[in-house]
Every structure is written in structure tokens, then in C-alpha cells.
């Protein structure tokens, strides 16, 4: 045990010094000794420490796996302090990954795990980090209150508070004030050796990094942080070889879930006419589309001559908006070329879904993966379109989303997170209110929560909808379940 503790302490020190390879090697040794000694508390500590490093590097999936495994161990050995820490750090991971709503949920879990004890200052700092996204002035007041009592904070906590305050000032004050606040943070971090405390957030804060380069490029701590973040990005690519390299190519962002938007740097994509925009989505979603298929989808009632003219006009509009080499014609087939960096939210959802679906039930990584997949579904596919291909694709994506909601609800029930399971099932029912299994599962979840009135309300609404839509009664097993639950 003592050898494992020593390796874990060494790993933490290497991490703070920016010696990430050495830190990972030491974490590996610490984990080995923890498992040899059956030291579950130490093993959870090591998993969280390694997860913190991966979170700083921007490797969200790897960090999520490790936080999930650490939380499972912490729950097994009934250590609320470790559970609270794992939830808090998972909240930070989600905030850095751009999902603040999920981060807020993890913060609530951290507070619940801490129970009646006062939450640590790191909790208040993360609350401030989330607040500054929507209410920077409120966040600034919270952070200033903490900074007014510096004796209550560690040097690392004070560095983080100063950094977050600098971000608040940048959002609410003048440029000189923002630069001065950031300089105060750099001065403190350089003096106390706490650069790594702010490096993880700085890595994802493009505006602050820009201010460092333009206003404080000569500051010694700014130079060290810039070099450290560059080394973090190099290491991250080694652990995630599929990560996109920085590229000077133009970026085109297709958003088809809950909206129908094509964003380009010059704003021309947003002004595309509906048919041209939808055609771009079809080509992107399909990979390759025959010319004849395009004209039949969009102009089936027109003569061949008019079809050709309309197609040429749509292609012209797309090339004007997205770039002349983006839409490629090979023979009689259209595809999107590689002259631009293309982001597509549907692809992100499908990748996240595939990842979650591959993990077996009970795997500690599965809950995190399911949460990520559910969060990446932004809504109905191209909601304003009634084209047949859109309607079918919308149905496929929604069905997959519902399956993910059910799987996440099942995992939540196994983990005794019944309230969360009920929320997920309600979301699923909002899309498919007549599914027998969803109504059955939600009734059972509400029963475990002791919400008898809600069971009655749910069942009666289900019975009315089933009768109104199909003239049917509920299946026997659901009627019997309802009778048992309210008796």
C-alpha cells in the first residue's frame, strides 16, 4: 500500500509540473500496487488522478472512463468524499467539453454526495465556472467573495479563482481591466508554481489564449503556459490518433438536429435557400448521391429540362456559399470534397451512440458514454422539412435516441438513480407516448419513488391516448401492474 501511495503522490506532482508522460507512468505503477494490495480506496484515488490528467489534456472519453471506474469503486466502499470528488471532476469535464447542462447535473450529485458537510472550495469554484457562462457578473461576485478570504484557499484554488475572475472581467469589463485581471492570475500562478491548475481550462478558452498572445505575450508565465498547452496537445494526439489536426482549411458546420443550419466563416451558408441547403444535407448524409436521384428527390414533378436547370442553380448556390471545390461531381455522382473541414452534428451523435452501444451492461464506462450520446442528440432531424428522405432519416435517428434513453434509464435504475431514470423515461415518452414498455418502466420508477398520484395520472393519460388513437385497451400485463402499484 505504501509503495502505491508513493507512486500516486509522485504522479500527482509530475502532473502539476507538466511532466505528463512521467505522471502517466507513475499512475500506472500506483494502480498496479493498489490492485496487488487490494487497496480499493487507493485504486479509486489513482483512477481519479489519472482522469484529472486526461481531462486537462482534453481526452474526454478516456477521462470519463476513468471517472466512471473510480466512482464505481468509491460507491462500493461507501466513501462519500470520493464520490463527491468524482462527481465534481466529472462536472468540470463536461463543462470543458461544452455540455454545461450535464455539468450542472454532476454538480448536484457532488453536493448530494457531500451530504450535510460544507462543500469544498473547489465546488464553489466550479459553480462559478458554470455561472460565468450565463451570468458573468454573478459569477464575478461569487469569486471575489472567495478571493477576499485568501487564507481559506490553497495556492492552487486561489490561482483558479483568479483565472475565473479574469474571465468574468473579460465578459463584463473593459479590455484594460481584463488584461490586468489576467496578469494578476499569471503573477500568482508563476510565483506559486500553480500553472497546471489553470492550464486545463486555458486549453479550451480560445479568447483568453488570444489575449495572452496579444496583450501578455512577454509575460514569463504566459510563455510557459503556451509551451505547456502545446505539449499537452501533442500528447493528446498520441493518445487519440483520430483527433483532428489543426488545419488552415475553411470550416463548414452542418447542424441538422433540431435545426437546419449550415455555418461558414463568411456567413454565406446561413443564407442558402431551403432546397440548396437540404440538398447539401442529403449529399453529406449519404456520402455520394447520383444526379438522377437528386432531381427526383427535389423536383419530381418537373420536366427533365427544368430538373437539370434547377439542379444547376442549386449547385451554383452551394458552390458560391461553401466554396467552389466543396461540392464535387464525379461522373454522374455528387459528393462533398475535402477542400473544407466539415463538422456534422448527426455524425457526432452516431459516433457517440455507437460507442455507448458497444459497451456491455454493468461496464463502469457505459453510464458516461450513454450520457454523452443522449446529450449529443439536439432534436428532430431537419425539423422544417417533410421530404420523404428526411422523414425516414428523422425516424431512424429518433428511434436510436429512444433506445439510448431507455438504456440510460436502465443503467440509472441499476445504480439506484431512480429520479434520473424517471426523467429519462419521461423524455422518451414525449417522443413516443404510446409505447407500452416505456409506460411500464416509468410506472415502476415512480413506484420506487413513492409517487402514487403520478402513477395514476400517467396511466390514465396512457389509457385515454390509446383509446383515442387506436380504439384499444392497455395490454393485460400493464393493467395488472397498475393494479398492484396503486393497491
Image (cartoon, rainbow, N blue to C red):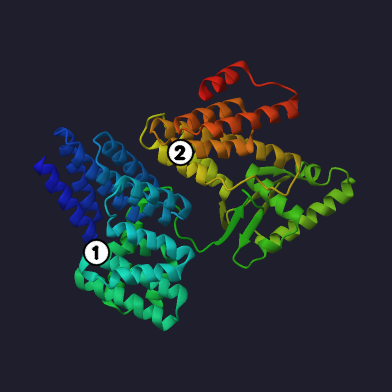
Give the mark nearer the N terminus: 1 vs 2. 1
The image shows residue 111, relative to residue 421, as above or below, that is: below
Residue at (75% x, 23% y) in the render = 471
| Residue 136 visible in rendering | yes
How many angstroms separate mark 1 from mark 2 (CA)?
Answer: 35 Å
Q: Which mark is on residue 419?
A: 2
* Comparing labels 1 and 2, the label whose residue is closer to the camera: 2
Q: Which mark is on residue 212?
A: none
| Residue 434 visible in rendering | no
Residue 164: image location, x then y, percent: 36, 68
Q: Residues within 10 Å of mark 1 (few under 14, many from 20)?
A: many
Query: Which of the two residues, 2 or 218, is positioned nearer the viewer here?
Result: 2
Residue at (46% x, 63% y) in the render = 133
Q: Which mark is on residue 156?
A: 1
In the drawing, does residue 327 fall left or right of residue 361?
right
Q: Residues within 10 Å of mark 2 (few under 14, many from 20)?
A: some
Q: Residue furthest bottom?
A: 176
In the drawing, does residue 280 fall left or right of residue 439?
right
In the drawing, does residue 240 fall left or right of residue 295?
left
Q: Label 2 near label 1: C-beta < 8 Å? A: no
Residue 398: image location, x then y, percent: 61, 38
Residue at (76% x, 56% y) in the render = 314
Amino acid at each position: 500500500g505504501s509503495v502505491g501511495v508513493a507512486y500516486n503522490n509522485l504522479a500527482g506532482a509530475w502532473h502539476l509540473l507538466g511532466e505528463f508522460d512521467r505522471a502517466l507512468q507513475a499512475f500506472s505503477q500506483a494502480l498496479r500496487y493498489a490492485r496487488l494490495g487490494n487497496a480499493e480506496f487507493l485504486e479509486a484515488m489513482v483512477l481519479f488522478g489519472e482522469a484529472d490528467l486526461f481531462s486537462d489534456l482534453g481526452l474526454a472519453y478516456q477521462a470519463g472512463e476513468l471517472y466512471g471506474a473510480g466512482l464505481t469503486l468509491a460507491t462500493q466502499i461507501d466513501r462519500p468524499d470520493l464520490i463527491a470528488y468524482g462527481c465534481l471532476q466529472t462536472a468540470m469535464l463536461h463543462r470543458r467539453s461544452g455540455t454545461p447542462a450535464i455539468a450542472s447535473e454532476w454538480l448536484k450529485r457532488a453536493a448530494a454526495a457531500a451530504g450535510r458537510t460544507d462543500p469544498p472550495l473547489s465546488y464553489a469554484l466550479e459553480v462559478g465556472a458554470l455561472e460565468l457562462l450565463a451570468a458573468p457578473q454573478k459569477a464575478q461576485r461569487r469569486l471575489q467573495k472567495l478571493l477576499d478570504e485568501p487564507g481559506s484557499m490553497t495556492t492552487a484554488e486561489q490561482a483558479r479563482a483568479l483565472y475565473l475572475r479574469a474571465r468574468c472581467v473579460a465578459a463584463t469589463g473593459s479590455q484594460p481591466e481584463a488584461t490586468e485581471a489576467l496578469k494578476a492570475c499569471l503573477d500568482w500562478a508563476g510565483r506559486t508554481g500553480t500553472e497546471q491548475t489553470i492550464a486545463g481550462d486555458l486549453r479550451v478558452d480560445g479568447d483568453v489564449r488570444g489575449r495572452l498572445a496579444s496583450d501578455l505575450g512577454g509575460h514569463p508565465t504566459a510563455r510557459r503556459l503556451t509551451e505547456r498547452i502545446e505539449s499537452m496537445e501533442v500528447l493528446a494526439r498520441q493518445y487519440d490518433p483520430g483527433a483532428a489536426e489543426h488545419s488552415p482549411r475553411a470550416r463548414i458546420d452542418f447542424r441538422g438536429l433540431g435545426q437546419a443550419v449550415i455555418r461558414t466563416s463568411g456567413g454565406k451558408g446561413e443564407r442558402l435557400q431551403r432546397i440548396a441547403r437540404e440538398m447539401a444535407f442529403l449529399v453529406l448524409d449519404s456520402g455520394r448521391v447520383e444526379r438522377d436521384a437528386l432531381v427526383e428527390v427535389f423536383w419530381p414533378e418537373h420536366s427533365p429540362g427544368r430538373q437539370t436547370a434547377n439542379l444547376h442553380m442549386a449547385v451554383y448556390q452551394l458552390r458560391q456559399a461553401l466554396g467552389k471545390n466543396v461540392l464535387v461531381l464525379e461522373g454522374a455522382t455528387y459528393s462533398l470534397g475535402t477542400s473544407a473541414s466539415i463538422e456534422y452534428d448527426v455524425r457526432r451523435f452516431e459516433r457517440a451512440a455507437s460507442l455507448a452501444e458497444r459497451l456491455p451492461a454493468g461496464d463502469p464506462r457505459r453510464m458516461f458514454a450513454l450520457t454523452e450520446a443522449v446529450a449529443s442528440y439536439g432534436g428532430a432531424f431537419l425539423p422544417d422539412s417533410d421530404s420523404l428522405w428526411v422523414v425516414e432519416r428523422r425516424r431512424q435517428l429518433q428511434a436510436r435516441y429512444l433506445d439510448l434513453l431507455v438504456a440510460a434509464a436502465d443503467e440509472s435504475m441499476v445504480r439506484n438513480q431512480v429520479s434520473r431514470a424517471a426523467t429519462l423515461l419521461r423524455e422518451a415518452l414525449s417522443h413516443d407516448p404510446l409505447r407500452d414498455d416505456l409506460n411500464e418502466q416509468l410506472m415502476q420508477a415512480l413506484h420506487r419513488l413513492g409517487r402514487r398520484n403520478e402513477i395514476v395520472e400517467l396511466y390514465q393519460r396512457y389509457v385515454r391516448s390509446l383509446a383515442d388513437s387506436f380504439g384499444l385497451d392497455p395490454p393485460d400485463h400493464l393493467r395488472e401492474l397498475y393494479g398492484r402499484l396503486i393497491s
